[in-house]
Image: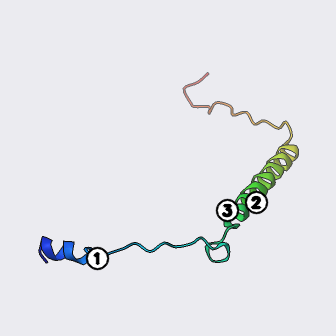
């Protein structure tokens, strides 16, 4: 195709005006997503809090590995 053919394709193009329809376009999808993300954050916070209470103040301390050269 040459450049002339490509420009001829869109020579008579007139964009069609499309109206917004809530039922088709899904007006509440973003709200559903936000609700799920919010509930996910709440559940993660609960799990973190429960893990912290189960673990308590237990801390592990590593000792140095003894070698033959140490006295």
**Extreme-top residue of the structure:** 71
Q: Position of residue 44 (x, y in %)?
A: 77, 52
Q: Is residue 24 above or below residue 51?
A: below
Q: CA distance from mark 2 to mark 1?
A: 46 Å
Specify which label sits upstream in the sequence, 1 or 3: 1
Q: Nearer the viewer, mark 2 or mark 1?
A: 1
Q: Residues within 10 Å of mark 2 (few under 14, many from 20)?
A: few
Residue occupying image coordinates x 80% and y 52%:
42
Residue occupying image coordinates x 75% and y 36%:
60
Q: Circle 1 sits on which residue?
A: 12
Specify which label sits upstream in the sequence, 2 or 1: 1
Q: Circle 2 sits on which residue?
A: 35
Q: Nearer the viewer, residue 63 or 32?
A: 32
Q: Quadrant of residue 68?
A: top right
Q: Is residue 66 left or right of residue 34?
A: left
Q: Position of residue 18 (x, y in %)?
A: 52, 73
Residue occupying image coordinates x 75% and y 57%:
40
Q: Residues within 10 Å of mark 1 (few under 14, many from 20)?
A: few
Q: CA distance from mark 2 to mark 3?
A: 9 Å
Q: CA distance from mark 1 to mark 3?
A: 37 Å
Q: Is residue 49 left or right of residue 70?
A: right
Quarter placement of the N terminus: bottom left
Q: Position of residue 17 (x, y in %)?
A: 48, 72
- What number is the disc on residue 47? none
Q: Is residue 35 above or below residue 58?
A: below
Q: Kindly state the secondary structure of the residue where label 1 is placed.
A: loop
Q: Quadrant of residue 29?
A: bottom right
Q: Nearer the viewer, residue 48 or 9?
A: 9
Q: Circle 3 sits on which residue?
A: 30
Q: Residues within 10 Å of mark 3 (few under 14, many from 20)?
A: few
Quarter placement of the C terminus: top right
Q: Kindly state the secondary structure of the residue where label 3 is placed.
A: helix
């Amino acid at each position: 195709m040459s450049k002339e053919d490509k420009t001829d394709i869109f020579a008579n193009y007139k964009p069609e005006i499309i109206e917004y329809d809530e039922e088709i376009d899904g007006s509440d999808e973003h709200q559903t997503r936000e609700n799920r993300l919010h509930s996910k954050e709440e559940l993660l916070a609960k799990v973190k809090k429960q893990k912290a209470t189960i673990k308590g103040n237990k801390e592990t301390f590593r000792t140095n590995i003894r070698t033959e050269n140490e006295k």
